[in-house]
Image (cartoon, rainbow, N blue to C red):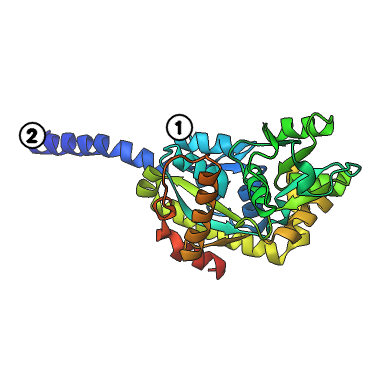
Amino acid sequence: MSRLLLGRRVLLGAVAVLAAPRILKAQAPLRVGDQRGNARAVMEASGQLRGFGDRIAWSEFPAAAPLVEALNAGAIDTGLVGDAPFTFGAAAGAPIKAIAATRENREGLAILVAKDSPIQSIQDLRGKRIATGRGSIGHQVILAALENAGLPLDAVQFVFLLPADAKAAWSRGSVEAWSTWEPYVSQEEVLNGARRVAHGQGITPGLGFQAARTEAIASRREELAEFVRRLAAARAWANANVEGYAKTWSDLMNIPAPVAEHWFRRAATRVVPIDDSVAADEQRNIDLYARANLVRRRIEAKELLDASFNTAIASGNRGA
């Protein structure tokens, strides 16, 4: 073998070795966090995972707080969370930004009491114990409802628990109320006759965020754009096919279809771009937490939002 040919083979081998880590990195799946089958279920039901699902590694979380912790730790690249846990995570220094937003009717974010409870209004909750997740959207709606009723933000006793523990405490009467979100609200209303003494419609912005690690935004932009495009298309499909989607989701999550249909018809969840209205509503959230002394440094909403994926979102909403 000539020296020239040998040299070329050595050079080609070295190039292949150097390129290998980048190839492997490019082939690694996008790590996506989910809650109660939320994004995954609607994307599967709508067909939006065809040709894309094998490029995603899903992780299921019981609530938004541990999902945000996973984002902070670098265990996942992106995940959908409510505006409250997103804000608390970002305020605590998690390297995340919102690359898409969701809006929905907020009647499914509510403070629940048992059907035979004497409590009839938010005023009746003064001094009472309310179970919710610390920094969750359930926590947020309590604060907003207290302000809306002209009550001080410390007028109730907070009992911070994850959803399963909160439901158990509420069911056995250890707390007088449970402030939670969907599908828990519809599940308790439809199956157990629970009553809402307050809900988020009109007093909270109704935002959720597709949060992503800043390093993922830099290195996996194409995949993130494709994900939010497909998620937007999936949500548009679900709103036009509520009954069918409710049946699919209930089969996946082993929850009665009437619960799912009650939730989906009320919520009408849609993916929206990061625009001025989203920034203004997120600033309202931040300011509420500041008044409650839950956020102790000045935060500007625009610092937490990334509008560079808006074209992909618009494409998904058009069904492209």
Residue type at tag 2: Arg
Can residue 254 be seen here?
Answer: no
**Image: 64 above or below 199:** above
Q: Which residue is label 2 attached to? A: 3
**Image: 233 above or below 214:** below
Quarter where residue 85 is shown: top right
Quarter where residue 296 is shown: top left
From the viewer's perspective, tell me whether residue 125 is left or right of residue 204.
right
Q: Count neighbours of disc 1 (C-alpha within 10 A) and say few if under 14, some if 14 to 19, many if 20 or more.
A: few
Residue type at tag 1: Ala
From the viewer's perspective, tell me whether residue 248 is left or right of residue 209.
right
Residue occupying the point 22% across, 35% down: 13
Quarter where residue 243 is shown: bottom right
Which SS class for mark 2?
Answer: helix
How many numbered badges does the structure rendering display?
2
Residue occupying the point 57% across, 37% down: 65
Rendering coords of residue 254 (x, y %):
78, 42
Which SS class for mark 1?
Answer: helix
Rendering coords of residue 313 (x, y %):
50, 63
**Separation of disc 1 and disc 2 at Cα?**
50 Å
Rendering coords of residue 92 (x, y %):
45, 37
Rendering coords of residue 265 (x, y %):
75, 61
Q: Which residue is label 1 attached to? A: 73
Give the mark, 1 or 2, whose residue is nearer the N terminus.
2
Of the pair 87 and 182, the residue shown nearer to us? 87
> Which quadrant would the N terminus be assigned to in this image?
top left
Q: Nearer the viewer, mark 1 or mark 2?
A: 1
**Image: 27 above or below 101:** above
Can residue 258 be seen here?
Answer: yes
Residue occupying the point 20% across, 35% down: 14
